[in-house]
Image: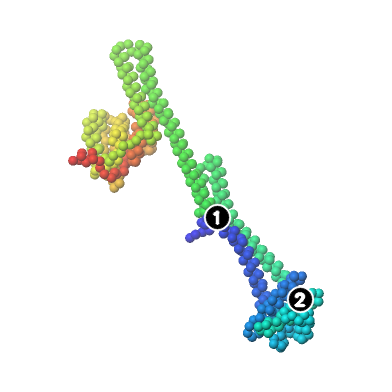
Amino acid sequence: MLHIQDIPLRRRLLMANVTMVLVPVCILTLLGLLLFQGLRFSAQQSDLATLWPEKGPALSIQYTVSSLRVKAEHPGPLKLKDLKEDCRTLEDLGIATAIIRDGRTMYVTPGSNATSLAERVLSKSGGQNTAMIWDGDGFFFRYTALHTGTTVIASGPMPFIAKSGIRAGLAKGVLQGLLIVIIVTASAIIIACGLILSHLLSRQILQPLETLRQAAAEIEKGNLDYPMTSTFRDELGRTCLAFDHMRRQLKSAREAQQRYEKNRKELIAGISHDLSTPLTLLKGYASGILEGIARTEEKKQRYVTQIYQNACTMEKLVEQLFLFSKLDLGQVSFSLTPVSLSSYMEDYTGENRQRLSERGLDLTCRTTGRACVQLDRAQFQRVVENILENSIKYKDKPKVAMEITVTDGPDQVRLVFADHGPGVAPPFLPRLFDSFYRTDAARTDVKKGSGLGLAIVRQIIEGMNGTISAGETPGGGLSIIITLPAAAKESEYEKNTHH
């Protein structure tokens, strides 16, 4: 259902302006028609002349004699009743009238003689059949309708004085009072209409503007949690909704900026810490060689080996940091091809099971279906290796088992790496994929990793339109769950592999 607040503001303003013009005109026209029709049906329209003594009689006489001329020209039987109504109007102004047809007097003002009245007017008009004379002697009127043979004669003194002064005075007072009431009533209705329209428009315009003002003031204070709602669907309502949408975007941008700043600080702190440890070791071993502490060849060889290993650790950290930065900036392009994830993991497990078992990780792979996903083979291999390396680094026993499961869904494929190692406490699971995050808050063992491995894994999976999360393995351990959208068809490579 359409409400008034749903109408466009421009159209509402136009409607209000038109209403402000039409309502007064309609009210005044209606009241005027009611007044004139009431006087007409009561045969008292001549009383209007009492309101303007200096102009009313003359105008009323001209109107009445014109009406008599028209009625005298009317063909057919003479309607004496209509003629008498006009005659009474003239008589109230002190003018005597007579109506003669075919030499027979049809009507004459009571107390007047038709013959003497006709002679007086005829002598004044000089014998003309049609004449209307205004002079110092009074008013003289004669009109003869040639087609009907009807003659109208009227004569009276100047100024025109009504025969009943009491009636005229009374009529004047009544009409003046009635006219004042009409004017006051019409003015009150017009003013009330204007106030109502002004109130409606001001409420519909000022209320959204006040909401905008309050919201802008809150934003100026830095409060981006101040909601702004509007029930209007016009231009102002849409402006409020757009402003609130901007507020939400600003809030999201500020939260993203805060997260970015927090991550940046953690990143700098992590880099500083993870680089300082191998640098300190490098400096210590190099000083031992320079200062002659390592005097034997065996000790020198051990110091040089430590320097090389720490340099390799730093190199790997820098490489991971460089890759993470490129992934975070979207500067790594993915060459995606449809690959059967089940076949890929079966092949990878078969090729690397022995090598990983020697490092303490026993792999088992269980797959269902042969659904394809869009993979960048090189980047996905990095994902698998980072997850496996993470389980090896943090195992608390010589051997740790890992189960790899691939499950096909209607529109996605689910890959789970579930190890039976020490696991991660539930509160820390959501942060495992943050850069430089390790459950060891003191970061005492840099050799176990920089904290970038799983962060890189998340960036790669999201770059391939997938999702990744961490959970607890039933019976203890850590599970990494990867979900990738199913591809349309398998690559030619996979087809050839199956055959």
Crowd band around label 2 with a 10 angstrom C-alpha radius: few (<14), some (14–19), many (20+): some
Q: Is residue 302 left or right of residue 145?
A: left
Q: CA distance from mark 1 to mark 2?
A: 60 Å
Quadrant of residue 353 within the rendered picture: top left
Q: Is residue 193 left or right of residue 314?
A: right
Which residue is under mark 2? 133
**Mark 1 and 2 residues: CB-CB less than 8 Å, in contact?**
no
User: Is residue 428 in view?
Assistant: no
Is label 1 in a helix, a strand or a loop?
A: helix
| Percent of width and height locating residue 311 | 34, 22
User: Which sits in the foreground, 206 or 103?
Assistant: 103
Instruction: Identify the amino acid type marked 1.
Output: Arg
Which residue is under mark 1? 10
| Percent of width and height locating residue 283 | 38, 18
| Percent of width and height locating residue 56 | 74, 72
User: Is residue 175 in view?
Assistant: yes
Question: Measuring 57% from the left and 53% from the top, which residue is drawn there?
Answer: 205
